[in-house]
Amino acid sequence: GSDTPEPVIPFAQPGSLTRVYAVASGKGGVGKSSVTVNLAAALAKRGLAVGVVDADIYGHSVPRMLGTEEKPTQVDSMIMPPQALGVKLISIGMFTPGNTPVVWRGPMLHRALQQFLADVWWGDLDVLLLDLPPGTGDVAISIAQLLPNAEILIVTTPQLAAAEVAERAGAIATQTHQQVVGVIENMSWLDLPDGSRMEIFGSGGGEAVSDALTKTLGARVPVLGQIPLDTRLREAGDAGAPIVLADPDSPAAQALIKIADGL
Ligand code: ADP
């Protein structure tokens, strides 16, 4: 033990008015970062003060999806986060040179997250969203310790094999005593030109995670929405203009905006 006091994380203080959501998934590639960025953009558009911590050490992609390559600056002892589309953000990728992978071990990750939460000048946020890495690793555990009040949002695809993994990601809430707000099913179907829906990844994954977590946690964990597959969602993410802003009338954007409105 050292004599250095633990840094104060304003979001974890009793009476903090910031809602904190940790966006989690079982597997990678299910659209967790896309969902995080679109929820953030939708909330910011509604006039809320929004921050995002990109803590996905394997796939930090939030800055690109928000269209910024800006780095944070240091003012005295505080880190000033870049802001894009009305969203303040900090990414683990901003502190690694070039496109090098993050190969930090647990304790170093923990300290980095602690810094993101304590030493970044967030101002008064209404909502803080954390994009977690997939699974139940070091970051999820650190966040549970640093932000016990963080509420968990689970992203899954309709595929039942993926849903089982997502259940495990949600079930850590029993140990961490965090609240799971709900399940977001992404890539639910593809709307075909003839008006029919093609269920590329099957169906039922969101319901399955919702039912399983409701049982495990003994509190209702609802499905908050289903987001269809949409080329424009992917393109918008690549272009740094989230679909909720770029094409707000599309069914995928409508689903995301409805979820954001319900938070
Ligand atoms: P994760 O954060 O879970 O790894 P991403 O958000 O990076 O997932 O999404 C993985 C890929 O799938 C990205 O290329 C993204 O643009 C694409 N994607 C995510 N959701 C959808 C969707 N509903 N429709 C089309 N493409 C999607």
Image (cartoon, rainbow, N blue to C red):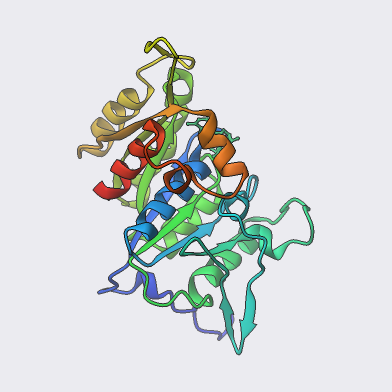
Relative horizontal placement of residue 117, taking residue 253 as reference (left or right): right
Relative horizontal placement of residue 87, taking residue 221 as reference (left or right): right
Image height of 105 relative to 250, above or below: below
Quarter of the rendered image showing ligand 1: top right
**Could you say where residue 64 lies in the image, as x and y percent from the top left?**
63, 51
Image height of 151 relative to 224, above or below: below
Residue 136 visible in this rendered orientation of the protein: no
Tell me the residue at 78%/53% (across/down).
100
Q: How many marks?
A: 0
**Could you say where residue 72 lies in the image, as x and y percent from the top left?**
63, 72
Tell me the residue at 49%/60% (across/down).
85
* Residue at the bottom extreme, as displayed: 76
Residue 130 versus residue 1: which sits nearer the camera? 130
Residue 22 visible in this rendered orientation of the protein: yes
Image height of 9 relative to 184, above or below: below
Relative horizontal placement of residue 63, taking residue 100 as reference (left or right): left
**Could you say where residue 14 lies in the image, as x and y percent from the top left?**
27, 73
Q: In the picture, residue 108 is in which quadrant?
A: bottom right
Q: In the picture, residue 95 is in which quadrant?
A: bottom right
Tell me the residue at 44%/14% (across/down).
192
* Residue at the left extreme, as displayed: 219
Image height of 113 relative to 232, above or below: below
**Could you say where residue 121 lies in the image, as x and y percent from the top left?**
50, 78
Residue 260 versus residue 179: which sits nearer the camera? 260
Q: In the picture, residue 17 is in which quadrant?
A: bottom left
Residue 7 versus residue 183: which sits nearer the camera? 183
The quarter of the rendered structure image containing the N terminus is: bottom right
